Image (spheres, rainbow, N blue to C red):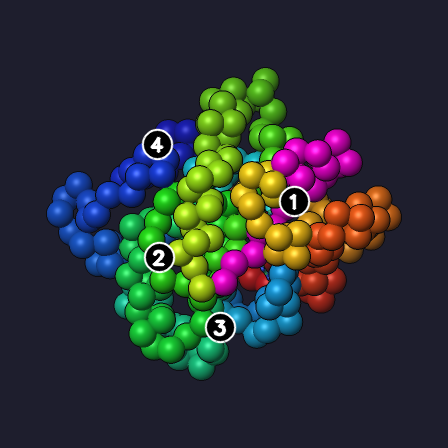
Amino acid sequence: MTSTGEIRFSHGIGGPTRGSDDGAPAATLGLRIAETFVSRQGEGKLTGVESFFVRTSGCNLRCWFCDTPYASWKPEGPRQTVSTIVDSVLQSGISHVVLTGGEPLLPDACVSLCQQLRDAGLHITIETAGTIDRDVPCDLMSISPKLSASAPDAGDHPQWHQRHHDRRMPIDLMRRLIDRSDDFQVKFVIDSPAEFDECAGVVESLQVRPDDIWIMPQGVSAEAMDTAATWLKPWCESAGYRFCDRMHLRWYGNRRGT
Ligand SMILES: C[S@@+](CC[C@H](N)C(=O)[O-])C[C@H]1O[C@@H](n2cnc3c(N)ncnc32)[C@H](O)[C@@H]1O
Ligand SMILES: Nc1nc2[nH]cc(C(=O)O)c2c(=O)[nH]1
Ligand code: SF4
Ligand SMILES: [Mg+2]
C-alpha cells in the first residue's frame, strides 16, 4: 500500500497480467479480504437467497457515497490464500457465493478463486463496478456502472476525482463482461433526478434491455430509500427499469457483515 492508503495493483485499467512481480502464482498470493459473512442477498434478481459473501479489499474507484469505505477508501483486512477462502465457503455448506468488494476483479487470484468455487458446484455472483477486463468464471455478473456524480469532490480529492472520471465507464469492456457471463444484471445507483438522462444513455450504449436494469436509490437507511422511492419509482416505471430496494438495509440496518 502507498502512504496515501492506495493499494498498488499489478496491472493498469483493463489489462490484467498473469502472476506477480516475485513470480509467485496468484492463488498462493491470494486476495486481501475485508470480511466474509453469511447473509441473504439484498440486491437484484437473487434477492433473498442465503449466500456466503466474500468482500475483497481495495478499489480502483473512490465513490463519494461508498457504503464500504473499509474496502475502498481505507482498505482493511489480511491476505487470504484461495484455498483458505474456498475451505471457509465449503465449511459453511452454503451453495451461493457473492464475491464483492472493494473491486473484486482487481486481484489476479479472483480467477482461481472463482474457478475452484465453480468446480465445487457453487453458484457465483460477482458484484463489480465493471472497470476491469477479466475473463472469470461466474454465474451472475452483477455490474454497477458508476455515473459521473458518484466521483469524489474535485477540491478535496483531485487525484481520485480525475481517476474516477478516467476509469468509471469503459462501455466496450462492460459489454465484454456481459457477453462472457452466463447471466448478468446492471445496477445503477441514483442520487438525484439530474442523473436520469445520463443513466438512460449508458443503458442505450450497453445495448441491454430495460428489463435487465436495476435502479438503486443512493443511501444506507430504509428512510433514505423510502424518500428516494417517491421520485425514483415513477421514473423506473416509465422507463421499464426495475426499482431495486436494498433489502439487507431493511432486514439488518446498515451493519457491517450483513
Ligand atoms: C460496495 S460495492 C462493491 C462492488 C463494486 N465496487 C461496485 O461498486 O459495484 C457493492 C454495491 O453497493 C452499491 N453501493 C455502494 N454504496 C452505495 C450507496 N451509498 N447507496 C446505494 N448503493 C451503494 C454499489 O453500487 C454496488 O452495487
Ligand atoms: N445482504 C447483502 N446483500 C448484498 N448484495 C450486494 C452487496 C454488496 O455489498 O456487494 C451486499 C451486501 O453487502 N449485503
Ligand atoms: S466502486 Fe464500489 S467499492 Fe469502489 S468506491 Fe465505488 S461503491 Fe465503493
Ligand atoms: Mg453492500
Instruction: Say if disc 1 is inside 8 Å of ligand 1.
Output: yes
Span colored in magenta: 183-201
| Residue at far left of view | 23
Mark 3–mark 1 Cα distance, whole angstroms, equals: 24 Å
Could you say whether the residue bearing mark 4 is in a helix, strand or loop?
loop
Q: Is residue 11 left or right of residue 194?
A: left
State yes or no: discs 3 and 1 in contact (Cβ < 8 Å).
no
Mark 1–mark 4 Cα distance, whole angstroms, equals: 29 Å
Q: What's under tag 2, amino acid-wise?
A: Val
Q: What's under tag 1, amino acid-wise?
A: Val
Q: What's under tag 3, amino acid-wise?
A: His
Could you say whether the residue bearing mark 2 is in a helix, strand or loop?
loop
State yes or no: discs 4 and 2 in contact (Cβ < 8 Å).
no
Circle 4 packing at 10 Å, graded few (<14), some (14-19), many (20+), is few
In the picture, the disc for residue 2 is 4
Q: What's under tag 4, amino acid-wise?
A: Thr
**What percent of the width, then of the height, locates residue 162?**
49, 23
Q: Is residue 31 left or right of residue 128?
A: left
Mark 4–mark 3 Cα distance, whole angstroms, equals: 35 Å
Of circles 1 and 2, which is in front? 2
Residue hosting label 1: 189
Could you say whether the residue bearing mark 3 is in a helix, strand or loop?
strand
| Residue 58 quadrant | top left
State yes or no: discs 4 and 3 in contact (Cβ < 8 Å).
no
In the picture, the disc for residue 136 is 2
Of residues 175 and 134, which is closer to you in this image?
175
Residue 113 in view, yes or no: yes
